[in-house]
Image: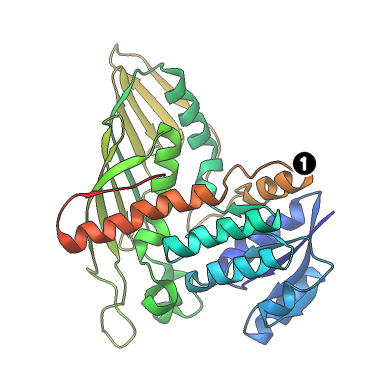
Amino acid sequence: MIRIGVIGGGVIVRRRHLPEIVENAYAEVGAVCDVVKEKAEELAEEYGCSAYTDYKDLIQDDSLDAVIVAGPNRFHAQMTVDALNAGKHVMCEKPMATSLEDAEAMIEAAKKNGKKLFIAQNQRLEAPHVKAKELIASGALGKVITFKSTFGHPGCERWAAEKQNTWFFKKDVSYYGCLGDLGIHKIDVVRWILGEEFTEVFAKVGTLNKVYEDGTPIDVEDNAVMLLTTASGVMGTITVSWTYEKEDARTIFYCENGVMTINGDPDYQIVIERFDGTADYLKLGAVSNNTVQVKTGIVDEFVDCLVNDVEPSIGGRDGLEPLKVVFSAYRSSEERRAVEIQHK
């Protein structure tokens, strides 16, 4: 049995990580940690585990095999490195770090300690994306020429306990706005489906609508648009937003022989429209959104790599490469030019 300690007591932990640990036959909740004592004790009572207010105490708990890091972005890297150095396997929420140097340090700490580092970029596990990757790789639609992907919702203050004063809006804690929160998902899943890296980005980011309770604009961007190019020449756009009243998570691939739309139809998660007039409508099951939470499988995937002692399917490098795109996009917007993205 894999005993997991969870650092953070926010919405993502309550809606996703803790319930998914309980549902896994090979895992159990061993401890929870939150700086707010009442939160930690409430969750500990609910899940029958230990409560901590300092993550440094949790990672020294010898009864734990692994840790989920789900605190604010600013603390991801240090918490992860400390946990790995304490001999724990780690699943870290996205974005994995607030600098490329910190991300590299996390990867190195996992290697040095012989522990698994898993990044919770769960959209890769969604059935429509898994099927889309299979279809693209099969060549049935011919090569991909262009794409467009969108991820927008009304904003994290809708579900955050602090509402408009949520840490997501504060640069010194979150570092990123919607680009790091939502963009990291779409950057990762599109590059994964295509099977290649983005090599150039032209981007525009801005704070267009969101304000704190006192009416002043938030510290980070609430909208971002990226024009991306891959090594093979595929071009496309990724648009992310915290200002869409109706959630939109569509991705469309325009190929030589037809068009594939993912999550664009309420009943069919993939719609394929071929240029010969034929079409396929695939029902692949519901995916999570801000209104409805379904099982993501992210904890199952993490636990599986520990139980079977295999490399994580979404490892440190899978968290690092999308971060390179994010930082290049910020630079592009600031310098108002296309920026080349360097990959090792």
Q: Is residue 22 above or below residue 43?
A: above
Looking at the picture, tell me which residue is in the foreground, 129 or 342.
342
Task: List x then y, in percent, for residue 261.
Answer: 36, 33
Describe residue 197's horizontal placement relative to residue 120 as left or right.
left
Describe residue 180's horizontal placement relative to residue 276 as left or right.
right
**Residue 336 placement: quadrant:** bottom left
Looking at the picture, tell me which residue is in the foreground, 317 or 242.
317
Can residue 266 be seen in this snapshot?
no
Identity of the residue drawn at 67% across and 49% down = 302
Looking at the picture, tell me which residue is in the foreground, 52 or 195.
195
Task: List x then y, in percent, for residue 286.
Answer: 54, 42
Crowd tier of the residue under label 1, counting other residues whose Cα lies within 10 Å: few below 14, some 14–19, many 20 or above: few
Which scheme is used to colour this image of the protein?
rainbow
Describe residue 76's horizontal placement relative to residue 87 as left or right.
left
Amino acid type, callout 1: Asn
Looking at the picture, tell me which residue is in the foreground, 50 or 76.
76
* Residue farthest along the front direction in this orientation: 112
Identity of the residue drawn at 68% across and 66% down = 85
* Residue farthest along the bottom direction in this orientation: 214
Can residue 293 be seen in this snapshot?
yes
Identity of the residue drawn at 48% across and 73% down = 74
Q: Which residue is mark 1?
A: 308
Task: List x then y, in percent, for residue 217.
Answer: 26, 79
Quadrant of the rendering where the C terminus is positioned = top left
**Residue 173 placement: quadrant:** bottom left
Identity of the residue drawn at 40% across and 79% down = 172
As helix, strand or loop, the secondary structure at mark 1 comes to: loop
Q: Is residue 117 above or below residue 235?
A: below
* Residue farthest along the top direction in this orientation: 276
